[in-house]
Image (tube, rainbow, N blue to C red):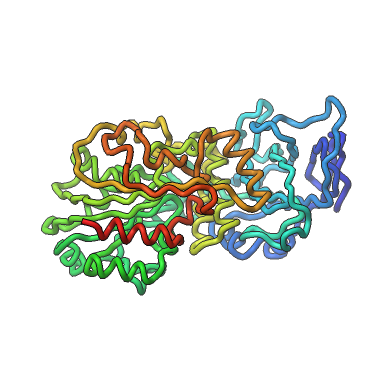
Amino acid sequence: MDAELDPYGDAVVVDDVVLRTPGLAGRVRTISTSGQQMRSEAQWTSALAEALENEDVEPQTIVEISDTHETDAPGGAGTRSTSFGEPAIELEVPGPSSGWGQLVLYTDESGVATWEFAEAEDGSPDTTRGTQPRTYVVRRTVPPVGPGEDGATRGVLGSIGKKVIGVLAFKLIDPVLGAVGEKFAEKWEGLKRPYGLRTFDPDTYRDAAGPSLQQADWTRLGEGKALLFVHGTFSRSYTGFSGLSPQVVKDLHQMYEGRVFAFDHFTLSHSPQQNIEWLLGQVPVDVDLDVDIVCHSRGGLVSRTLAEKQGELSTGGRRVNVDKLVLVAAPNGGTILTDTNHMSAFIDTYTNLFNFVPDNGVTEVLEGIITVAKHIAIGAVKGLRGLQAMHPSGDFLSWLNVPTDVESRYYAMAGNYEPADRGWALWAKDHLMDAIFESNNDLVVPTAGVYDINGSSKFPVEERLEFGSDAGINHTTFFADAIVQEKLLSWLGST
């Protein structure tokens, strides 16, 4: 069934969906078939469809809005206000079946995707676990890209030219992991993103199943300076550093005489302290490690914990000496996106980073995003300790950013990114730059926060590489850049 939208703000009912769209004209239809047919109609790509299926998320219904144009709504017409103050689509849909949760994935005409969560009458999050109808206030930007302009498809989430609202349902009791609650992310990471230490060599560094460290590897790592890679949020070693060229990895192997390894760890549910306590627990007591570290994003906080705070952790008497630490896009001053009020913007940002700039492991990243979205949908963000460690005024950074006498040498890389795609650029300006961030940023981390004064005596970092907006480097694409690779070799190769 399809119908005309009412730009005057009156309710339009299509099957069991109610919409109010003051100021927006166009046509709306619902797609209520199931399985592959529904995904095909919504034009979701295989990466998104696979991620949803892997995380046991089922489409409940798809709402497609086409042939849209903005009009002047009469006085008095309106929907519930949004936190960004822009026009909105108010969507009322049937609640999920008993034992299921619900959320929405919205994609606009330009391909920008956002996760939406049910709202109560007062505008607060509605975390009701019943089957009552749910109301979503979908933030409606006005994309500057028309249907068919600049190509037929964008990114990994499907085609442009239409607004697509996917109403998604997920089981509140996972058959393997149990209840979706504050412990869910920890169980999820234990099953799907487990801790591990692996070799990192030119032949296998992009392989998902890279060789785990064996006793002989530990012995070799202890025979001289080693290089450790520590990835960031939603990532794994093989995805986070896949942008490095095989030649650069080969050069690093030669530089460190083969003593190069990587640390896979929980990024959502465990604090950096927990990450490092696990790492130190794996180091054989008879191996003395002396390492340089290349780390990305939240991995910078994990690496600094190793460098600066070993004496305050349960280490079992083990110690690792950290000499050089290269902090790439690390939130040393935090990122406000991990505030509870902005957590949905955090996953929106990562969704669009991998939507518009696809990279190795897109499906894995989307699976992690979906897991966080489940936590937000049921109000269980306290279970996301790994993300909350990046809060600018949180307990973790207050503990980390203090004077220290460690002698490790710090280097930093930071960037200021402005999307080239016009629809994405508009969303980033309205939802990040103007509404959340108050300074230059790479879409996740404030630029200066990577290297600037923060309370630690290791900051500001004087040896640094900073990219302007003309470089086109966002939070997830540093390692594919030739200048970054050259600087890594230079910094790590210096005495």
Q: Residue at x 69, y 39 (%)?
A: 139
Q: Quadrant of residue 211?
A: bottom left
Kindly give the residue lying farthest to the left in the view shown. Answer: 286
394 relative to 350, above or below: above
Judge whether residue 211 can be spotted in this image. no
Residue 281: image location, x then y, percent: 22, 52
Residue 263: image location, x then y, percent: 32, 57
Considering depth in this image, is 281 or 256 the residue closer to the camera?
Answer: 256
Q: Residue at x 85, y 34 (%)?
A: 72
Q: Residue at x 31, y 37 (%)?
A: 459
Q: Residue at x 55, y 39 (%)?
A: 378
Kindly give the residue lying farthest to the bottom in the view shown. Answer: 203
Q: Is residue 134 left or right of residue 129?
A: right
185 relative to 90, above or below: below
Judge whether residue 259 can be spotted in this image. yes
Q: Is residue 4 left or right of residue 334?
A: right
Q: Quadrant of the C terminus?
A: bottom left
Residue 413: image location, x then y, percent: 39, 49
- How many numbered marks are there? 0
Considering depth in this image, is 494 or 117 the residue closer to the camera?
Answer: 494
Residue 99: image location, x then y, percent: 59, 46
Q: Quadrant of residue 122?
A: top right
Q: Is residue 466 left or right of residue 64?
A: left
